[in-house]
């Protein structure tokens, strides 16, 4: 009797990881990101692309990571530097880098990560469907701010969808109460993915610039900065056929990635696994001499003040709002950006 051939394991989708890196904090964070990736995903097959803004009209001070140990370490961990020019935002709104850089990237599936992210698990376990883009739901209701007698949540968001020629109806989570902020699609831009970096980037930049330059009456009372990337992102994802992340993506902001944002917050609220990933990355023999020059790592990791911060909180019963965590850390002299 002939043996039934074993099924081949499902082929993992190949994609590029994109992050913005430049002199200062982002360069040091990129080193931690790369080190955590190589530790947790030694067989990662994609490219790691560090988008680097170039000096110019909108970056009068050279933003590039200078030649030296940090740049060499990033290249040694497999990073490829991809230069791009800021045409719309630059230094006045540096967050705009994540929109402007994508057009310079290869036309391929991608996962964009903020540099203040650690990879703590196997990316191959994440069920990416790059034809259906999505983004992080680890956010608070930071935008819009509803004023008494002003436009409602619905009117505010609908005006933006109308501006971009989109139908808001499919994006509304009807399980949420009317006029509750989570009823409307709103993401953290710490991670997002799609099928084509340039196509995504062109749409992202066009949407953000249209909101900035042709702000609907319902939105003129709202602050656009620093939230512009997160205001534009749901419109982009909806226009490209995506939506909120499903259960297959639970590893992002879960067992596979952690967007920690600031090291005091990491020690206060993240899992032991995340702390271990950070400290393993920071204590690499090739990185430790470099990261000693970066005050947050020096203070939190090498001087063990992160462990002091960690002891202040019960991670099973954290304050509901980040502001309360920050207040405790500041009172103990353990807050820094």
Image: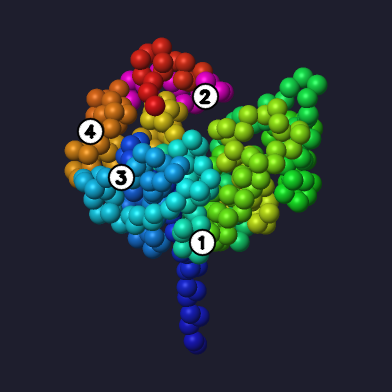
Q: Which is more foreground, mark 3 or mark 2? A: 3
Residue 246 visible? no
| Quadrant that contains the C terminus | top left
Give the tally of numbered discs. 4
Residue, disc 1: 109
Cα separation, mark 3 vs mark 2, equals 31 Å
Q: With respect to residue 265, does 82 lie above or below?
A: below
Q: Compare residues 141 and 175 and report the one nearer the observer.
A: 141
Q: Earlier in the sequence, mark 2 or mark 1?
A: 1
Tell me, yes or no, whether the two marked residues, 4 and 3, touch with CB atoms within 8 Å.
no
Q: Which SS class for mark 2? A: helix
In the image: residue 179, left or right of residue 250:
right
Identify the residue at image location x=51%, y=57%. Answer: 103
User: Where is 312 relative to 21, above or below?
Assistant: above
Tell me which label, 4 or 2, sits earlier in the chain.
4
According to the picture, the residue beneath numbered tag 2 turns out to be: 322
Camera-near label (4 vs 3) is: 3
To which residue does mark 4 refer? 292
Q: Is residue 276 left or right of residue 321?
A: left
| Residue picked out by circle 3 | 65
Write down the region rendered in magenta: 306-323
- Label 2 Cα neighbours within 10 Å, binned few <14 / some 14-19 / many ≥20: few
Callout 1: SS: loop
Q: How is the image coloured?
A: rainbow
Q: Can residue 90 be spotted in the picture? A: yes
Q: Do the numbered discs 1 and 3 sit on residues whose CB atoms are within 8 Å?
A: no
* x then y, percent, for residue 252: 50, 46
Element type at mark 3: loop
């Amino acid at each position: 009797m002939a043996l039934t051939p074993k099924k081949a394991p499902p082929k993992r989708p190949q994609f590029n990881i994109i992050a913005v890196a430049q002199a200062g904090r982002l360069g040091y964070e990129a080193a931690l990101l790369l080190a955590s990736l190589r530790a947790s995903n030694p067989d990662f097959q994609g490219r790691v692309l560090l988008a680097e803004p170039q000096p110019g009209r909108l970056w009068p001070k050279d933003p590039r990571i200078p030649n030296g140990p940090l740049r060499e370490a990033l290249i040694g961990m497999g990073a490829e530097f991809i230069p791009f020019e800021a045409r719309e935002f630059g230094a006045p709104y540096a967050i705009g880098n994540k929109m402007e850089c994508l057009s310079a990237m290869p036309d391929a599936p991608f996962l964009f990560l903020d540099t203040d992210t650690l990879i703590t698990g196997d990316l191959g376990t994440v069920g990416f469907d790059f034809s259906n883009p999505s983004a992080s739901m680890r956010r608070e209701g930071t935008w819009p701010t509803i004023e008494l007698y002003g436009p409602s949540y619905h009117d505010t968001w609908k005006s933006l969808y109308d501006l971009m020629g989109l139908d808001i109806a499919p994006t509304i989570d009807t399980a949420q109460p009317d006029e509750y902020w989570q009823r409307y699609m709103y993401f953290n831009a710490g991670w997002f993915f799609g099928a084509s970096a340039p196509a995504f980037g062109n749409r992202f930049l066009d949407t953000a610039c249209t909101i900035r330059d042709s702000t609907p009456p319902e939105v003129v009372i709202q602050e656009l900065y620093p939230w512009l990337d997160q205001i534009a992102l749901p419109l982009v994802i909806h226009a490209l056929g995506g939506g909120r992340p499903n259960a297959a993506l639970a590893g992002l902001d879960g067992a596979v990635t952690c967007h920690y944002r600031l090291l005091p917050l990491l020690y206060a609220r993240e899992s032991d696994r995340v702390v271990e990933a950070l400290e393993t990355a920071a204590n690499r023999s090739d990185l430790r001499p470099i990261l000693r020059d970066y005050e947050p790592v020096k203070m939190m990791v090498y001087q063990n003040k992160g462990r002091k911060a960690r002891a202040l909180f019960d991670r099973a019963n954290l304050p509901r709002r980040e502001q309360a965590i920050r207040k405790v850390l500041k009172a103990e002299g353990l807050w820094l950006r």
